[in-house]
Amino acid sequence: MKIKFILDSAADMPEELTDKYDIDVFPLYIHHGDKQYKDGIGITSKKVYENMKNGEVYKTSQVAVNDFMEKFEEYAKKDKTVIYPAFSSELSGTFQSAVLAKNKIKEKYPDFDITIIDTKSASMGVGLALYNVLQEMEKNNLNKKEIIEKIKYYAEHMEHIFTVEDLDYLVRGGRLNKISGLVGGILNIKPIIEVENGKLEQLEKKKGSKKVRKRIIELFLEKGTNIAEQNLAILHANSKKKAEEFKSEIEEKTKYKSVIFSDIGAVIGAHTGPGTYGIIFLNEKRKVNEVEIYK
């Protein structure tokens, strides 16, 4: 049984990997004034970040139900088995759109075999969970049930730790109150942020970029389990040089199996801003109990 994997664009999985594994990606929407774009189509994340630096504001919205329905019907007609690890339902309505589309399509095609997983993860937290399973599939003959349980396991234990260059973007996006943003900007205080139960939460805050980077690496070493055997994801928003320096500092501290560099797409970046960077990895001591599976 061949399984078709799909993602939404908020997973930020690099194109070379989606091409390699034939993964369809459903774009969320980017709004700029009265213009609307599909993420990565018609406008690039680089252009979004350049405009944000000039004070322009972008908003985002979920994948449309009709976008899902059109493709789901195509899969159903071809009798495909589909698995979709979705962007956290706490951060977007995309998961709910997919479930609604699935229910509508199954009225017409009751045997359509699709599983949607609310990963409670964001960016390459979703992509890395799937990538880990895809690598296992290359070595072992996993059945559908095993694949779904493994994606769920990786999502439950995925750590996201990152920081932003400018607190003002989080304020604009409603992720931080204005007073905190103002004080942070004046004092050069930067937050260390994690994804906790599917939401963005401030983990700590430090003064100055060097202290923040040092602390993120410390947290990675404290929370990461069996790091030498792990695939890591280093993500960045139009700040590849910063991400490469971050990678070099990590390599001074520990070994790992592999690392994926991931450009943070415009959907996540519209809220966190250019200059954002961080790391995603597995912490087997941690468990999110709210990862849900819908068949």
Image (spheres, rainbow, N blue to C red):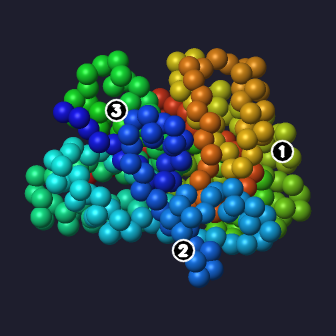
State the residue position of label 1: 209
The residue to which callout 2 is attached is 36
Looking at the image, which is closer to me, 71 or 192? 71
Residue 50 lies, with reference to residue 174, above or below; the image says: above
- Please name the residue shown 51% across and 31% down the image: 282
Residue at image x 50%, y 53%?
A: 10
Q: Earlier in the sequence, mark 2 or mark 3?
A: 2
Q: CA distance from mark 2 to mark 3?
A: 36 Å
- Snapshot quadrant of residue 108: bottom left
Neighbor class of circle 2 (other Cα within 10 Å; few <14, some 14-19, many 20+) is some
Outermost residue toward the bottom? 34
Residue that label 3 marks? 150
Q: Where residue 68 sits: x, y (%)?
A: 32, 62
Which corner quadrant of the image does residue 146 belong to?
Answer: top left
In-front residue for pair 65/183: 65
Q: Position of residue 122 (x, y in %)?
A: 51, 50
Which disc is residue 88 wearing? none
Q: Give the SS element for disc 3.
A: helix
Spatial separation of the CA atoms under disc 1 and disc 2: 34 Å
> What kind of residue is marked 1?
Ser
Q: Characterize the local packing of mark 3: few (<14), some (14-19) or many (20 or more) Cα atoms within 10 angstroms.
A: some
Type of amino acid at the residue the image marks with label 3: Lys
Could you say whether the residue bearing mark 2 is in a helix, strand or loop? strand
How far from the left and from the top, in percent, is residue 139? 35, 18
Left or right side of 281 for 250 = right
Give the SS element for disc 1.
Answer: helix
Q: Residue at x 28, y 63 (%)?
A: 70
Q: Amino acid at mark 2?
A: Gln
Q: Position of residue 233 (x, y in %)?
A: 58, 35
